[in-house]
Image (cartoon, grey):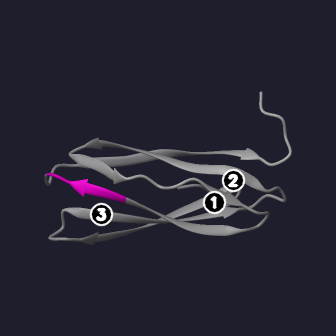
Amino acid sequence: MAGFSDPIYAEAYIYIYGHQYDIILDILIVNQTPDTLQGVLLELATHGDLKLVEKPSQINLASQDFANIKAAVKVSSTANGVIFGNIVYDVAGTASS
C-alpha cells in the first residue's frame, strides 16, 4: 500500500470468511519518521460490487511506532472490484494551514 521510503509504511493482509462474501483487511501502519503523527487515518473507498461496512479508526503513532487496524468489506457478487485509499495525518507540534 505504501513504500519503504514513505513517511508511513502500510501493508495489508486480506482474510476471506463467511462463505467468501466477507473480507477483513488487517492493515499494518508503521510511522517511519522521528515525529509523532496524530490523527492517522486510512480513508478507504471501493469500486464495483464491494461495500465498506467497517471503516478503520483514527490513531496516533509515536516516532517509529506501529499499529494494526482493521476494515471490513462485504462482497455482493463475483464481479471484479477494487479497494483503494489514502493515508492522512498531522505531525504533532506543527501548525496546520
Type of amino acid under label 2: Asp
Q: Is residue 56 left or right of residue 35?
A: left
Closer mark to the observer between disc 3 and disc 1:
3
* Residue 29 in which image quadrant: bottom right
Name the dominant secondary structure of the magenta segment: strand
Q: Residues within 10 Å of mark 3 (few under 14, many from 20)?
A: some
Residue at mark 3: 23
Type of amino acid under label 3: Ile
Type of amino acid under label 1: Tyr
Q: Is residue 65 left or right of residue 68?
A: right
Instruction: Tell me what residue is drawn at x 72 percent, y 68 percent.
Output: 65
Distance, label 2 to label 3, CA atoms, is: 27 Å
Residue at mark 1: 9
Q: Foreground residue, 7 or 42?
A: 42
Which secondary structure, mark 3?
strand
The residues colored magenta run 72-76
Looking at marks 2 and 3 on the same chain, the residue that comes earlier in the sequence is marked by 2
Which secondary structure, mark 1?
strand
Asked if the residue under mark 1 is in contact with the one under mark 2, i.e. CB atoms within 8 Å, the reply is: yes
Query: Where's residue 95, x and y in %?
Result: 83, 35
Query: Where's residue 92, x and y in %?
Result: 81, 49
* Residue 78 in which image quadrant: bottom left
Give me the disc on residue 6.
2
Q: Foreground residue, 11 or 54?
A: 54
Distance, label 3 to label 1, CA atoms, is: 22 Å
Distance, label 2 to label 1, CA atoms, is: 6 Å
Q: Residues within 10 Å of mark 1 (few under 14, many from 20)?
A: some
The answer to whether residue 89 is above or below residue 27 is above
The answer to whether residue 73 is above or below residue 49 is below
